[in-house]
Amino acid sequence: MNWNRTISLTITTIMMLLSACQKKADTEVKPDDVTISIASPASKQIFHKGDTVKVNADVAYTEQLHGYIVTITNTANGVVVFETEGHSHSDHMAINETWVDTLNTSTELELTVTAVIDHDENLKNAKLIFNCQP
């Protein structure tokens, strides 16, 4: 392969990667149009140390979404006990994450599922409370 072809392929690859995450310039972002449905855990559900908490949610929007963030936070002290994220280029995301309860005390936790609409910090959240007991 000659030098010019190598440079051309490299530039083409970089351009494709840079354009892959861009929204359409004329698309108005409407976070209120994003729907987030949390199937599990159930609100106020109780888990015990060693249980696996399954986080299942569906996120949908009229345009392409960028990704999601799932956090589980101790409501008493604000400590995040679990956080993960996913990357997507679709108008629908099925979220299936798990966290094993390792807490030693009775704790109220807040699950937050965040839809990341784009790179401009446009977000939509859905939250619920559940509990862990030793």
Image (cartoon, rainbow, N blue to C red):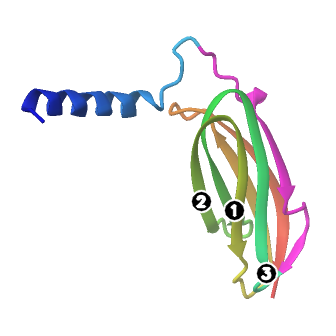
Marks 3 and 2, Cα distance to the nearest angstrom? 18 Å
Q: Quadrant of residue 32?
A: top right
Locate the N terminus by quadrant.
Answer: top left
Q: Amino acid at mark 2?
A: Thr
Is residue 3 or residue 118 the one in the foreground? 3
Mark 1: which amino acid?
A: Glu
Circles 1 and 2: CB atoms closer than 8 Å: yes
Q: Any mark on residue 51, and which?
A: 3
Residue 34 lies in magenta, yes or no?
yes
Choose top left, top right, bottom left or bottom right for residue 7.
Answer: top left
For residue 84, the mark is 2
- Outermost residue on the top side: it is 26
The quadrant the C terminus occupies is bottom right
- Residue count near mark 2 (Cα–Cα under 10 Å), binned few <14, some 14–19, many ≥20: few
Q: CA distance from mark 1 to mark 2?
A: 8 Å
Q: Earlier in the sequence, mark 3 or mark 2?
A: 3
| Magenta segment | 27-47
Amino acid of disc 3: Asp
> Mark 3, residues whose alpha carbon is within 10 Å: few (<14), some, or many (≥20)?
few
The stretch drawn in magenta includes residue 33: yes
Secondary structure under the numbered disc 1 in the rendered image: strand
The residue under label 1 is: 97
Position of residue 128 measured from the top left corner of the image (x, y, whole percent) = 83, 56
Left or right position of 79 against 45:
left
Report the front residue among 109 and 91: 91
- For the point 41% across and 27% down, the residue is 19
Q: Secondary structure at mark 3?
A: loop
Tell me: residue 3, above or below residue 76. Answer: above
Which of disc 2 and disc 1 is earlier in sequence? 2
Q: Nearer the viewer, mark 1 or mark 2?
A: 1
